[in-house]
Amino acid sequence: MMRRAGQVANSILQKMKQATIAGVTTGELNELARSELAKHNAIGLSKNYPTYKPGEGFPAETCISVNEEVVHGIPGQRQLREGDVVTLDLALSLGGYCCDSAITVPVGDIHPAAKKLLDVTRETLVLAVQNMKPGRKWSDIARLMQHNVETNGFSVVREFVGHGIGRTMHEEPKVANFVTAEQLRGDFKLRPGMTLAVEPMVVMGRRDVVLLDDNWTVVTEDRMPAAHFEHTVAVTETGVDILTDGRPAPVAAT
């Protein structure tokens, strides 16, 4: 069921990616996602997600973050321009099971440093997935991720981490992309059957972030670009199965 949800999420993200061109608005990209979610009888989990202020849930089906926006960008009238980098973040529920996935895509030709940022962030997610296996501590994976980012001259955002996922979008455990004393206190071992959302968030400059006045959009304090890639994965007996890579769910035996 989670793979079916992941297949739908992947198909919607790919359509959004194709539509991410100069001149389109982030609101139009969200409308595309809203239409596709309805077509598949899926629920966009960002819509009405609660904040600390009552009655101020997130106003859109997706989070779309541009350039210095790290996460939780609100879709609207902003027109994309050549050279922008855009994070498309989609969490959905289908048949009572959830998935969460994100990609950062370029608008036309982008600066070489921005391209490297996207490449390194994507590679960091791949590195994590390739090294996950039962019995391994998550801190081992997080250390690899942080090392890959920092040796390439970038920084890992520490205010946001991945998470368990299943019947609801945000479940335990917390899935960090870095290692600190606090993270080690919450360390855990991977075991078969775990389903996790792994999502490195990487910034070009300093790792410090701030919350804008809309109480949702998080931006880099130095206003340098950010990138974010995410997959929902299931730990298996030998490694992991990526549930949001677009592969179809297996057909049940009859």
Image (spheres, grey):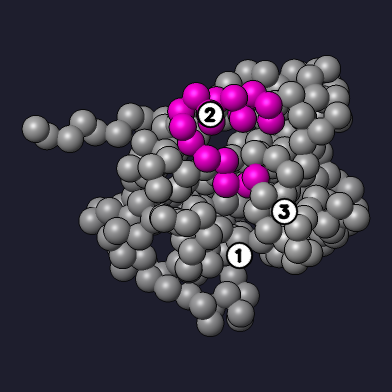
Q: Which mark, residue 57?
A: 3
Q: Is residue 117 visible?
A: no
| Res. 1 image quadrant | top left
Q: With respect to residue 203, does 21 lie above or below?
A: above
Judged by depth in the image, the label closer to the viewer, 1 or 2, is 2
Q: Name the quarter where the C terminus is drawn.
A: top left
Please tell me how crowded label 3 is: few (under 14), some (14-19), or many (20+) other residues with Cα within 10 Å: some
Amino acid carrying mark 1 in the image = Phe
Left or right: where 208 falls relative to 106: right
In the image, 179 versus 233, the foreground residue is 233
Q: Position of residue 11 (x, y in %)?
A: 49, 26
| Pointer 2 residue | 38
| Pointer 1 residue | 178
Q: With respect to residue 37, does 214 lie above or below?
A: below
Q: Position of residue 32 (x, y in %)?
A: 64, 23
* Span highlighted in magenta in the image: 30-47
Q: Which mark, residue 140?
A: none
| Res. 120 image quadrant | top right
